[in-house]
Image: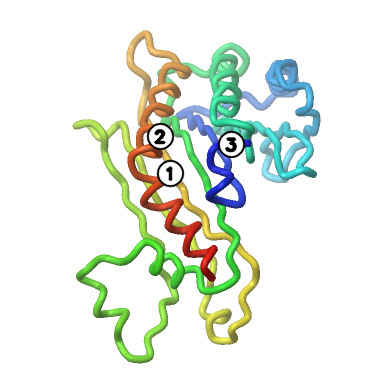
């Protein structure tokens, strides 16, 4: 069981490598790449192409825990939903980034952006934005606004992006997505839907000389782990989980 299961209903860890040039789309190259990934993870046996031409290899989704990887026109992605541990997901991402240069002719020079995304879903039937406000608060300068007589919060999706170096090539972003709309608030008919917390660490541009994609991923992982331990768990995940449990 992953370390976040006590806070949220679903947790996923995703890696995205966006390239400046288009990736190979020919049959032999695509299949050879996926076969190499499948060799490491034999249970990834569901292969298909989406309408827009993306290629997908994934495990069965029946038990809510599965691995997947995709090739799009200019992006390679890898993800694990409800992994047994963060490290088990990171190992899959490392494998994809290790084999992509050889199998998909991706060069460190061709990197537009590399990002590592943590996603946390919280099931909640009710006004998502109201719950987020109660759990996480709101800027003091806006508190009087929500006290206006008869006012109801329709949308509150706090987010912040930080640059972690002077060149702004290394960044991280925390954002919260709510899914309640005005119709649901007006009628009082709320579906059982998800509030999602995203935390992303991203590196922009070509890699440093002699650096590999795996090296860069490890740096992003270090950033994410530090942010999780020092801020995200205590200040975001725990308050949301507690607020939902009290409803």
Q: Position of residue 56 (x, y in %)?
A: 70, 34
Q: Is residue 247 above or below residue 226?
A: below
Q: Which residue is mark 3?
A: 2
Q: Residues within 10 Å of mark 2 (few under 14, many from 20)?
A: many
Q: Position of residue 31 (x, y in %)?
A: 74, 21
Badge 2 vs badge 3, beta-carbon distance below 8 Å = no
Q: CA distance from mark 1 to mark 3?
A: 17 Å
Work out how far the residue at label 1 is from the one at label 2, CA to CA, in angstroms: 8 Å
Quadrant for residue 90, please give it: top right
Query: Which quadrant of the structure image shows residue 225?
Result: top left
Residue at position x 42%, y 57% in the image:
239
Give the mark nearest the N terminus, 1 or 3: 3
Q: Callout 3 environment at 10 Å: few (<14), some (14 to 19), or many (20+)?
A: few
Residue located beneath label 1 in the image? 199
Disc 2 element = helix
Asked if marks 1 and 2 touch (Cβ < 8 Å), the reply is: yes
Task: Using residue 172 as the reference point, say whether residue 183 is left or right of it.
Answer: right
Q: Nearer the viewer, residue 201 or 147?
A: 147
- Residue 224 — which label? 2
Q: Residue at x 35, y 40 (%)?
A: 172
Q: In the image, 142: left or right of 86? A: left
Total labels: the figure holds: 3
Question: From what the image shows, is residue 245 above or below residue 69?
Answer: below
Q: Position of residue 77 (x, y in %)?
A: 58, 33
| Residue at the outermost bottom position | 149
Please name the residue shown 46% across and 19% down the image: 213
Which of pointers 1 and 2 lies earlier in the amino acid sequence? 1
> How far separated are the C-alphas under marks 2 and 3?
15 Å
């Amino acid at each position: 069981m992953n370390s976040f299961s006590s806070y949220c209903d679903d947790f996923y860890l995703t890696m995205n490598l966006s390239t400046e040039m288009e990736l190979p789309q020919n049959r032999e190259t695509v299949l050879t790449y996926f076969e190499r990934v499948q060799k490491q993870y034999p249970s990834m046996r569901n292969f298909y192409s989406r309408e827009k031409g993306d290629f997908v290899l994934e495990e069965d989704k029946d038990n809510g825990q599965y691995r997947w990887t995709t090739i799009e026109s200019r992006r390679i992605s890898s993800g694990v939903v409800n992994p047994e541990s963060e490290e088990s997901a990171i190992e899959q991402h490392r494998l994809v980034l290790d084999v992509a240069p050889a199998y998909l002719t991706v060069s460190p020079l061709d990197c537009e952006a590399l990002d590592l995304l943590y996603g946390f879903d919280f099931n909640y039937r009710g006004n998502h934005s109201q719950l987020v406000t109660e759990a996480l608060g709101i800027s003091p300068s806006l508190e009087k606004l929500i006290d206006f007589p008869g006012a109801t919060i329709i949308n509150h999706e706090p987010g912040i992006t930080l640059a972690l170096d002077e060149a702004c090539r290394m960044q991280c972003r925390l954002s919260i997505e709510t899914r309640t709309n005005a119709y649901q608030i007006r009628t009082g008919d709320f579906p059982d839907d998800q509030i999602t917390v995203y935390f992303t660490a991203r590196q922009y541009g070509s890699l440093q000389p002699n650096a590999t994609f795996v090296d860069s991923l490890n740096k992003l992982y270090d950033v994410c782990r530090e942010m999780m331990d020092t801020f995200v768990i205590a200040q975001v995940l725990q308050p949301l989980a507690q607020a939902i449990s009290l409803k």
